[in-house]
Image: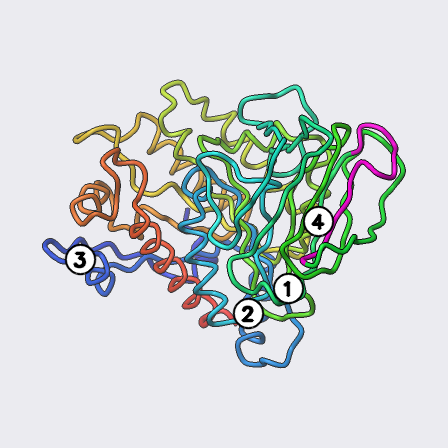
Amino acid sequence: MIKFLKYITAVIVITITVGCSVAESKTSTASAIIDFGDPNTKQFTRSLKLLANNKKTNKVINITQFGDSHSAADFFTGEFRTLMQKKYGNAGVGWITPIEIKGQNHAAVTWKFNHWDVLSSRKLSNLDFPMGGFIAKPNKDSAAIQIIPIGLKDKTWQVKLTFKMLKSSSNILTLYDANNNKLDFSYMPKSNIWQTTTVVSKLPLIIKGQRSIELGGVWLTRYQQPGVIVSSIATNGAKQTILQKWGQDWYKELSVSKSDLVILQYGTNESFDKSLNADQYRNNLINNIRLIRKTLPNAAILLMTPPDTMLNETDMPPSFAKVMEIQKQVAKSEKTLFWDWQVAMGGKYSIKQWRQQKLARPDLVHQTLKGYKESARIFYTDLNEFVRKNS
Protein backbone atom coordinates (compact mmCIF):
# COMPACT_ATOMS: atom_id res chain seq x y z
CA MET A 1 0.00 0.00 0.00
CA ILE A 2 2.95 2.36 0.60
CA LYS A 3 3.68 2.52 -3.11
CA PHE A 4 0.34 4.25 -3.71
CA LEU A 5 0.95 7.10 -1.27
CA LYS A 6 2.45 9.26 -3.97
CA TYR A 7 -0.94 9.45 -5.65
CA ILE A 8 -2.87 10.62 -2.60
CA THR A 9 -3.64 14.31 -2.85
CA ALA A 10 -5.97 14.62 0.16
CA VAL A 11 -6.25 13.15 3.63
CA ILE A 12 -9.41 11.63 5.06
CA VAL A 13 -10.09 12.54 8.66
CA ILE A 14 -13.11 11.08 10.43
CA THR A 15 -14.53 12.85 13.46
CA ILE A 16 -18.07 12.05 14.60
CA THR A 17 -19.67 14.97 16.40
CA VAL A 18 -22.56 14.00 18.64
CA GLY A 19 -25.52 16.29 19.10
CA CYS A 20 -25.01 18.60 16.11
CA SER A 21 -26.37 18.68 12.59
CA VAL A 22 -24.58 17.09 9.65
CA ALA A 23 -23.89 20.54 8.23
CA GLU A 24 -22.32 21.61 11.52
CA SER A 25 -20.26 18.43 11.86
CA LYS A 26 -18.89 18.98 8.34
CA THR A 27 -16.49 21.53 9.82
CA SER A 28 -14.82 18.76 11.79
CA THR A 29 -15.53 15.81 9.51
CA ALA A 30 -13.47 16.03 6.34
CA SER A 31 -14.18 13.74 3.43
CA ALA A 32 -12.03 14.08 0.35
CA ILE A 33 -11.55 13.09 -3.24
CA ILE A 34 -8.42 10.96 -3.54
CA ASP A 35 -6.42 10.75 -6.75
CA PHE A 36 -4.80 7.35 -7.23
CA GLY A 37 -3.06 8.55 -10.38
CA ASP A 38 -5.79 9.23 -12.91
CA PRO A 39 -3.97 10.34 -16.09
CA ASN A 40 -6.58 13.00 -16.90
CA THR A 41 -6.87 14.71 -13.50
CA LYS A 42 -4.88 17.80 -14.47
CA GLN A 43 -6.75 18.26 -17.73
CA PHE A 44 -10.12 18.04 -15.94
CA THR A 45 -9.27 20.37 -13.06
CA ARG A 46 -7.60 22.94 -15.30
CA SER A 47 -10.62 22.98 -17.62
CA LEU A 48 -12.95 23.66 -14.70
CA LYS A 49 -10.73 26.40 -13.36
CA LEU A 50 -10.51 27.99 -16.83
CA LEU A 51 -14.30 27.90 -17.08
CA ALA A 52 -14.67 29.56 -13.68
CA ASN A 53 -12.20 32.31 -14.53
CA ASN A 54 -13.24 33.02 -18.12
CA LYS A 55 -16.94 33.60 -18.62
CA LYS A 56 -16.38 34.37 -22.33
CA THR A 57 -15.07 30.91 -23.12
CA ASN A 58 -17.15 28.46 -25.16
CA LYS A 59 -15.97 25.55 -23.04
CA VAL A 60 -18.49 22.87 -21.94
CA ILE A 61 -17.58 20.41 -19.19
CA ASN A 62 -19.57 17.16 -19.29
CA ILE A 63 -19.87 15.09 -16.10
CA THR A 64 -21.65 11.74 -16.51
CA GLN A 65 -22.71 9.67 -13.51
CA PHE A 66 -23.74 6.01 -13.88
CA GLY A 67 -25.52 4.61 -10.85
CA ASP A 68 -28.34 2.93 -8.98
CA SER A 69 -31.34 4.35 -7.09
CA HIS A 70 -29.17 6.92 -5.30
CA SER A 71 -28.69 8.54 -8.71
CA ALA A 72 -31.96 7.55 -10.40
CA ALA A 73 -34.08 9.95 -8.33
CA ASP A 74 -31.81 12.81 -9.49
CA PHE A 75 -31.91 14.25 -5.97
CA PHE A 76 -28.14 13.90 -5.50
CA THR A 77 -27.20 14.58 -9.12
CA GLY A 78 -29.84 17.30 -9.45
CA GLU A 79 -28.44 19.28 -6.51
CA PHE A 80 -24.88 18.67 -7.70
CA ARG A 81 -25.90 19.91 -11.17
CA THR A 82 -27.46 23.05 -9.71
CA LEU A 83 -24.41 23.88 -7.60
CA MET A 84 -21.95 23.27 -10.43
CA GLN A 85 -23.96 25.36 -12.87
CA LYS A 86 -24.23 28.26 -10.44
CA LYS A 87 -20.45 28.35 -10.21
CA TYR A 88 -19.41 27.40 -13.74
CA GLY A 89 -22.41 28.16 -15.95
CA ASN A 90 -25.48 26.26 -17.15
CA ALA A 91 -24.74 24.39 -20.38
CA GLY A 92 -27.86 22.23 -20.20
CA VAL A 93 -29.49 19.11 -18.80
CA GLY A 94 -27.46 16.28 -20.28
CA TRP A 95 -28.72 12.73 -20.79
CA ILE A 96 -32.33 11.85 -20.00
CA THR A 97 -34.51 8.77 -20.51
CA PRO A 98 -36.77 8.89 -23.60
CA ILE A 99 -39.89 9.08 -21.42
CA GLU A 100 -40.64 9.21 -17.72
CA ILE A 101 -39.65 6.04 -15.88
CA LYS A 102 -41.95 4.96 -13.07
CA GLY A 103 -40.23 5.36 -9.70
CA GLN A 104 -37.52 7.61 -11.11
CA ASN A 105 -37.23 11.35 -11.50
CA HIS A 106 -35.37 14.15 -13.18
CA ALA A 107 -34.97 17.57 -11.61
CA ALA A 108 -34.70 19.49 -14.88
CA VAL A 109 -37.32 18.01 -17.24
CA THR A 110 -40.83 16.60 -17.36
CA TRP A 111 -42.51 14.45 -20.00
CA LYS A 112 -46.00 14.19 -21.45
CA PHE A 113 -46.62 11.08 -23.52
CA ASN A 114 -49.20 8.60 -24.74
CA HIS A 115 -49.16 5.16 -26.34
CA TRP A 116 -45.61 4.17 -25.34
CA ASP A 117 -44.33 1.13 -23.48
CA VAL A 118 -41.07 1.08 -21.52
CA LEU A 119 -38.62 -1.83 -21.67
CA SER A 120 -35.92 -2.00 -18.97
CA SER A 121 -32.59 -3.79 -19.01
CA ARG A 122 -32.95 -4.46 -15.29
CA LYS A 123 -35.86 -6.82 -16.02
CA LEU A 124 -35.00 -8.01 -19.53
CA SER A 125 -31.74 -9.33 -20.91
CA ASN A 126 -32.54 -10.56 -24.42
CA LEU A 127 -32.85 -7.17 -26.14
CA ASP A 128 -30.40 -4.83 -27.81
CA PHE A 129 -30.55 -2.06 -25.23
CA PRO A 130 -28.96 1.33 -25.87
CA MET A 131 -26.86 3.12 -23.26
CA GLY A 132 -28.93 3.69 -20.13
CA GLY A 133 -30.83 0.45 -20.55
CA PHE A 134 -34.30 1.83 -21.39
CA ILE A 135 -36.30 1.54 -24.62
CA ALA A 136 -39.47 3.50 -25.34
CA LYS A 137 -41.58 1.60 -27.85
CA PRO A 138 -44.92 2.75 -29.37
CA ASN A 139 -47.94 0.50 -28.87
CA LYS A 140 -49.91 2.54 -31.42
CA ASP A 141 -48.89 4.40 -34.55
CA SER A 142 -50.15 7.64 -32.98
CA ALA A 143 -47.58 7.57 -30.13
CA ALA A 144 -46.22 10.94 -29.04
CA ILE A 145 -43.81 12.31 -26.44
CA GLN A 146 -43.34 15.91 -25.34
CA ILE A 147 -40.07 16.73 -23.53
CA ILE A 148 -40.44 19.86 -21.41
CA PRO A 149 -37.53 21.57 -19.66
CA ILE A 150 -38.17 23.07 -16.24
CA GLY A 151 -37.24 26.67 -16.97
CA LEU A 152 -35.22 27.93 -19.97
CA LYS A 153 -38.13 27.25 -22.34
CA ASP A 154 -37.28 30.27 -24.49
CA LYS A 155 -33.70 29.11 -25.05
CA THR A 156 -32.32 27.28 -28.07
CA TRP A 157 -31.21 23.70 -27.45
CA GLN A 158 -29.13 21.09 -29.20
CA VAL A 159 -30.98 17.78 -28.97
CA LYS A 160 -29.32 14.45 -29.64
CA LEU A 161 -31.80 11.59 -29.97
CA THR A 162 -30.86 7.90 -30.06
CA PHE A 163 -33.28 5.69 -31.99
CA LYS A 164 -33.60 2.45 -33.90
CA MET A 165 -35.81 1.83 -36.94
CA LEU A 166 -37.17 -1.70 -37.11
CA LYS A 167 -37.82 -1.14 -40.80
CA SER A 168 -36.49 1.50 -43.18
CA SER A 169 -39.06 4.23 -43.68
CA SER A 170 -39.06 8.02 -43.84
CA ASN A 171 -42.18 8.66 -41.80
CA ILE A 172 -41.96 6.39 -38.75
CA LEU A 173 -40.25 9.11 -36.68
CA THR A 174 -41.06 12.83 -36.81
CA LEU A 175 -39.85 15.70 -34.62
CA TYR A 176 -41.51 19.06 -33.95
CA ASP A 177 -40.28 22.20 -32.18
CA ALA A 178 -42.03 24.37 -29.58
CA ASN A 179 -44.07 26.07 -32.35
CA ASN A 180 -45.11 22.71 -33.83
CA ASN A 181 -42.82 23.17 -36.82
CA LYS A 182 -41.53 19.92 -38.26
CA LEU A 183 -37.79 19.52 -37.86
CA ASP A 184 -35.49 18.06 -40.48
CA PHE A 185 -32.94 15.54 -39.25
CA SER A 186 -30.50 13.15 -40.84
CA TYR A 187 -30.42 9.41 -40.33
CA MET A 188 -29.00 6.27 -41.83
CA PRO A 189 -31.59 4.36 -43.90
CA LYS A 190 -30.73 1.14 -42.12
CA SER A 191 -32.92 -0.96 -39.87
CA ASN A 192 -32.11 -2.58 -36.54
CA ILE A 193 -29.15 -0.40 -35.59
CA TRP A 194 -29.02 2.28 -32.93
CA GLN A 195 -28.13 5.67 -34.33
CA THR A 196 -28.06 9.22 -32.97
CA THR A 197 -29.36 12.29 -34.77
CA THR A 198 -28.95 15.94 -33.80
CA VAL A 199 -31.39 18.85 -34.16
CA VAL A 200 -31.32 22.45 -32.92
CA SER A 201 -34.64 23.62 -31.58
CA LYS A 202 -36.51 25.51 -28.92
CA LEU A 203 -38.20 23.24 -26.41
CA PRO A 204 -40.62 21.61 -25.66
CA LEU A 205 -39.70 19.01 -28.26
CA ILE A 206 -42.42 16.75 -29.64
CA ILE A 207 -41.51 13.26 -30.82
CA LYS A 208 -44.03 11.24 -32.83
CA GLY A 209 -43.40 7.62 -33.65
CA GLN A 210 -44.98 4.56 -35.22
CA ARG A 211 -44.78 0.97 -33.98
CA SER A 212 -41.62 0.26 -35.98
CA ILE A 213 -39.45 2.75 -34.04
CA GLU A 214 -37.61 2.41 -30.73
CA LEU A 215 -36.21 5.31 -28.74
CA GLY A 216 -33.18 5.36 -26.46
CA GLY A 217 -31.68 8.22 -24.49
CA VAL A 218 -31.85 11.93 -25.28
CA TRP A 219 -29.09 14.51 -24.72
CA LEU A 220 -30.23 18.08 -24.04
CA THR A 221 -27.53 20.75 -24.37
CA ARG A 222 -28.04 24.50 -24.50
CA TYR A 223 -26.98 25.67 -27.94
CA GLN A 224 -23.55 27.33 -27.95
CA GLN A 225 -23.72 27.96 -24.21
CA PRO A 226 -20.60 27.38 -22.05
CA GLY A 227 -20.78 25.81 -18.64
CA VAL A 228 -21.26 22.44 -16.98
CA ILE A 229 -23.58 19.53 -17.74
CA VAL A 230 -24.24 16.78 -15.19
CA SER A 231 -25.94 13.66 -16.58
CA SER A 232 -27.49 10.94 -14.45
CA ILE A 233 -27.65 7.57 -16.22
CA ALA A 234 -29.15 5.34 -13.56
CA THR A 235 -31.64 2.60 -12.77
CA ASN A 236 -33.41 1.72 -9.53
CA GLY A 237 -32.04 -1.52 -8.08
CA ALA A 238 -29.08 -1.64 -10.47
CA LYS A 239 -25.77 -3.34 -9.93
CA GLN A 240 -22.77 -2.35 -12.02
CA THR A 241 -23.25 -5.55 -14.07
CA ILE A 242 -26.21 -3.78 -15.71
CA LEU A 243 -23.74 -2.27 -18.18
CA GLN A 244 -23.18 -5.79 -19.52
CA LYS A 245 -26.92 -6.10 -20.23
CA TRP A 246 -26.84 -3.27 -22.73
CA GLY A 247 -26.07 -3.79 -26.40
CA GLN A 248 -22.49 -4.54 -27.37
CA ASP A 249 -22.07 -1.08 -28.93
CA TRP A 250 -23.60 1.01 -26.12
CA TYR A 251 -20.25 2.64 -25.37
CA LYS A 252 -20.34 4.36 -28.78
CA GLU A 253 -23.17 6.49 -27.40
CA LEU A 254 -20.99 7.39 -24.44
CA SER A 255 -18.33 8.67 -26.82
CA VAL A 256 -20.91 11.12 -28.21
CA SER A 257 -21.11 12.74 -24.77
CA LYS A 258 -17.47 13.83 -24.84
CA SER A 259 -17.52 13.42 -21.07
CA ASP A 260 -14.70 15.03 -19.09
CA LEU A 261 -15.49 13.11 -15.90
CA VAL A 262 -17.27 9.75 -15.60
CA ILE A 263 -18.53 8.74 -12.17
CA LEU A 264 -19.37 5.11 -11.34
CA GLN A 265 -21.79 5.08 -8.40
CA TYR A 266 -22.71 1.46 -7.73
CA GLY A 267 -22.29 -0.96 -4.85
CA THR A 268 -25.31 -0.64 -2.56
CA ASN A 269 -27.26 -3.48 -4.17
CA GLU A 270 -24.13 -5.63 -4.38
CA SER A 271 -23.56 -5.10 -0.64
CA PHE A 272 -26.83 -6.93 0.18
CA ASP A 273 -25.75 -9.99 -1.83
CA LYS A 274 -24.75 -12.67 0.70
CA SER A 275 -23.08 -14.76 -2.00
CA LEU A 276 -21.24 -11.95 -3.79
CA ASN A 277 -18.34 -13.40 -5.77
CA ALA A 278 -15.49 -11.02 -4.99
CA ASP A 279 -13.36 -12.01 -7.98
CA GLN A 280 -16.23 -11.62 -10.45
CA TYR A 281 -17.19 -8.28 -8.93
CA ARG A 282 -13.61 -7.00 -9.08
CA ASN A 283 -13.02 -8.19 -12.65
CA ASN A 284 -16.29 -6.72 -13.88
CA LEU A 285 -15.50 -3.36 -12.30
CA ILE A 286 -12.03 -3.36 -13.86
CA ASN A 287 -13.42 -4.26 -17.28
CA ASN A 288 -16.00 -1.45 -17.10
CA ILE A 289 -13.34 1.10 -16.18
CA ARG A 290 -11.09 -0.03 -19.02
CA LEU A 291 -13.96 0.13 -21.51
CA ILE A 292 -14.72 3.70 -20.43
CA ARG A 293 -11.03 4.62 -20.68
CA LYS A 294 -10.86 3.21 -24.20
CA THR A 295 -14.05 5.01 -25.21
CA LEU A 296 -13.14 8.34 -23.58
CA PRO A 297 -9.33 8.41 -23.41
CA ASN A 298 -9.31 12.03 -22.18
CA ALA A 299 -11.88 11.63 -19.40
CA ALA A 300 -11.11 11.30 -15.71
CA ILE A 301 -12.91 8.45 -13.91
CA LEU A 302 -14.16 8.57 -10.32
CA LEU A 303 -15.35 5.63 -8.24
CA MET A 304 -17.99 6.68 -5.72
CA THR A 305 -18.61 4.20 -2.90
CA PRO A 306 -22.05 3.39 -1.51
CA PRO A 307 -23.29 5.74 1.19
CA ASP A 308 -23.36 4.41 4.74
CA THR A 309 -26.00 1.66 4.76
CA MET A 310 -27.35 -0.72 7.39
CA LEU A 311 -29.16 -4.03 7.14
CA ASN A 312 -31.01 -3.35 10.40
CA GLU A 313 -30.47 -1.38 13.61
CA THR A 314 -27.22 -3.18 14.46
CA ASP A 315 -25.75 -4.83 11.35
CA MET A 316 -24.17 -3.73 8.10
CA PRO A 317 -25.20 -5.48 4.85
CA PRO A 318 -23.36 -8.82 4.52
CA SER A 319 -21.06 -7.77 1.66
CA PHE A 320 -20.74 -4.05 2.40
CA ALA A 321 -17.16 -4.20 3.69
CA LYS A 322 -16.15 -6.46 0.77
CA VAL A 323 -17.60 -4.04 -1.81
CA MET A 324 -15.91 -1.05 -0.19
CA GLU A 325 -12.53 -2.76 -0.06
CA ILE A 326 -12.70 -3.97 -3.67
CA GLN A 327 -13.69 -0.54 -4.93
CA LYS A 328 -10.71 1.06 -3.21
CA GLN A 329 -8.36 -1.66 -4.46
CA VAL A 330 -9.60 -1.19 -8.02
CA ALA A 331 -9.36 2.60 -7.77
CA LYS A 332 -5.68 2.10 -6.89
CA SER A 333 -4.91 -0.54 -9.50
CA GLU A 334 -6.77 1.28 -12.30
CA LYS A 335 -5.54 4.73 -11.21
CA THR A 336 -8.90 6.47 -10.84
CA LEU A 337 -10.26 9.15 -8.56
CA PHE A 338 -12.05 7.91 -5.45
CA TRP A 339 -14.72 9.41 -3.14
CA ASP A 340 -15.88 7.60 -0.03
CA TRP A 341 -19.55 8.49 0.50
CA GLN A 342 -19.66 6.67 3.83
CA VAL A 343 -16.82 8.83 5.17
CA ALA A 344 -18.57 11.93 3.84
CA MET A 345 -21.60 11.07 5.95
CA GLY A 346 -19.52 10.66 9.12
CA GLY A 347 -18.38 7.03 8.96
CA LYS A 348 -19.80 3.68 9.94
CA TYR A 349 -23.35 3.74 11.38
CA SER A 350 -23.73 7.45 10.55
CA ILE A 351 -26.90 6.58 8.61
CA LYS A 352 -28.69 6.31 11.97
CA GLN A 353 -27.72 9.88 12.87
CA TRP A 354 -28.86 10.99 9.42
CA ARG A 355 -32.20 9.25 9.98
CA GLN A 356 -32.57 11.00 13.33
CA GLN A 357 -32.05 14.33 11.58
CA LYS A 358 -34.54 13.33 8.83
CA LEU A 359 -31.75 13.14 6.28
CA ALA A 360 -32.19 9.37 5.77
CA ARG A 361 -35.25 7.20 5.35
CA PRO A 362 -36.36 4.54 7.84
CA ASP A 363 -34.93 1.75 5.62
CA LEU A 364 -31.39 2.88 6.57
CA VAL A 365 -30.46 2.64 2.89
CA HIS A 366 -31.89 5.63 1.07
CA GLN A 367 -31.70 9.28 1.99
CA THR A 368 -34.46 11.85 2.01
CA LEU A 369 -34.50 14.69 -0.52
CA LYS A 370 -32.85 16.86 2.11
CA GLY A 371 -30.26 14.15 2.79
CA TYR A 372 -29.32 13.64 -0.85
CA LYS A 373 -28.96 17.40 -1.25
CA GLU A 374 -26.67 17.45 1.78
CA SER A 375 -24.59 14.62 0.30
CA ALA A 376 -24.39 16.49 -3.01
CA ARG A 377 -23.23 19.65 -1.25
CA ILE A 378 -20.46 17.70 0.49
CA PHE A 379 -19.36 16.14 -2.80
CA TYR A 380 -19.50 19.54 -4.54
CA THR A 381 -17.36 21.08 -1.79
CA ASP A 382 -14.87 18.21 -1.97
CA LEU A 383 -14.66 18.42 -5.77
CA ASN A 384 -14.02 22.15 -5.76
CA GLU A 385 -11.37 21.81 -3.06
CA PHE A 386 -9.78 19.09 -5.18
CA VAL A 387 -9.87 21.38 -8.24
CA ARG A 388 -8.31 24.20 -6.22
CA LYS A 389 -5.41 22.01 -5.14
CA ASN A 390 -4.81 20.28 -8.46
CA SER A 391 -5.20 22.87 -11.18
Q: Is residue 312 left or right of residue 177?
A: left
In the figure, residue 195 lies in which quadrant? top right
Upstream in sequence: badge 1 or badge 3:
3
Which residue does the numbered mark 4 point to in the structure image? 255
> Which residue shows up at 43% across the image and 65% down it?
83
* Mark 2 and mark 1: Cα distance apart in space: 18 Å
Q: Secondary structure at mark 4?
A: helix
Q: Which residue in the rendered view is the most extreme toward the left? A: 19
Q: How is the image coloured?
A: rainbow
Amino acid found under the numbered disc labelled 1: Arg
Q: Looking at the picture, tell me which residue is in the foreground, 335 or 117.
A: 117
Q: CA distance from mark 4 to mark 3?
A: 41 Å
Q: Which residues are magenta?
A: 165-178
Dot 3 crowding, Cα within 10 Å, few <14, some 14–19, many 20+? some
Which quadrant would residue 31 be assigned to in this image? Answer: bottom left
The residue that mark 3 highlights is: 21
Give the residue type at disc 2.
Leu
The nearer-to-camera label among 1 and 3 is 1
Q: Main secondary structure of the magenta part?
A: loop
Q: Is residue 357 above or below residue 386?
A: above
What whole-number distance in Å separates the C-alpha atoms at marks 4 and 2?
20 Å
- Nearer the N terminus, badge 4 or badge 2? 2
